[in-house]
Structures are given as C-alpha cells and as structure tokens.
Image: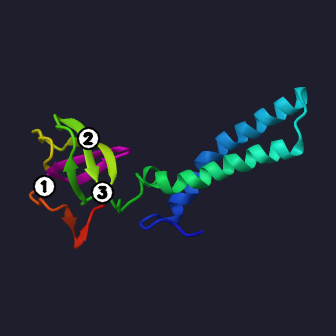
Amino acid sequence: MILPAGCRRQTLLRYILLQLPGTALLVLALLIIDHFRPLLDRWFWGIITLWLAKEAVLFPLTWRSYQADLPDDPLIGRTGTSVTPLDPQGTVQLGHELWQARVTGDGNISEGKPVRVTNRAGMLLEVTQSDREDGKQNGHQDG
C-alpha cells in the first residue's frame, strides 16, 4: 500500500486497530439480523465490503489525526493563516485544511494574520503569530 506523504506505517496500524471494534460491531449486527431475517450471502458480504471500502477511502483524508501522538509531527513548524480571530481559540488554515487552534501563551491573533504551529494536542493546534506573510516554511509553500 502506498501511504500519503508524511504518513508513517505506525499511523496506518493505529488506524486499522481503531477501526476493528466498529467493523466487529457491524459483523455482529449483520449476524443478529441474519438470525432473525436471513440475508442473502451477497448482501452480507456486500455490506462488509462497502464498510471496508469506506475505511480505505477515509484513511487518506483522516490519517493526520491518528498520527497526533507520534514524534516529529509534520504540522509543527508549518505556517498558515488565521481564519477567525484567535481570542485565544479560533480557526486557522494550513494549506487547504481548516484546524481549530489556540494561541500559545498570552495574547490574541487577529483574523487574516500569519500563524506558525508550535504544538499539537490531538486535533487542536497551538500557534503563535508568524512574521512570515508568504506561508513558506523550509522552502515549500503550504497548500
């Protein structure tokens, strides 16, 4: 399997392991339904196949949230723009993604100002105001 850029194999493993309970509940629910109202085999396996396809489609869109606790988070150090005022919490845009963020330390950041990610707590970014207006970090442009 080809992983998205910046994604680690441990992230894929974490994603798969966290999807197992939901998949097991689906199979259990289908077995219970099949007990009381028999399902055709193609329906049973078709539903499971669609469920697994959904998981495969969602992984490239959600993998960053499963990598949050791993070291060397690729979001730390990136720059973006505040979409709403950060007083102390609001929304920032990194590339094409919107993230909830809060200002590190005291202070506020106005809407439209450049920000730099300093830390991450799950799905919440910690940011400071950046002096860079162009959104560039280490020679690449976010987005």
Write the residue at 62% across / 49% down. 54
Q: Residues within 10 Å of mark 1 (few under 14, many from 20)?
A: some
Write the residue at 81% across / 47% down. 45
- Front position among marks 2 and 1: 2
Which secondary structure class fits the magenta region best? strand
What numbered label is drawn on residue 130? 1
Q: Tell me which numbered mark, 2 or 1, is placed earlier along the sequence.
A: 2
Q: Tag 3, which secondary structure?
A: loop
- In this figure, which residue is indicated by the disc labeled 2? 91
Separation of marks 1 and 3 at Cα, in angstroms: 15 Å
- Tell whether 114 sits left or right of 98: left
Q: Tell me which numbered mark, 1 or 3, is placed earlier along the sequence.
A: 3
Q: Tag 1, which secondary structure?
A: loop
Q: Which residues are magenta?
A: 114-129
- In this figure, which residue is indicated by the disc labeled 3? 95
Q: Tag 2, which secondary structure?
A: strand
Tally of marks: 3
Residue 33 occupies quadrant: top right
- Front position among marks 1 and 3: 3
Task: Say whether residue 24 is magenta.
Answer: no
**Pointer 1 and pointer 3: residues touching (CB < 8 Å)?**
no
The figure's colour scheme reads rainbow
Write the residue at 43% across / 68% down. 5
Separation of marks 3 and 2 at Cα, in angstroms: 13 Å
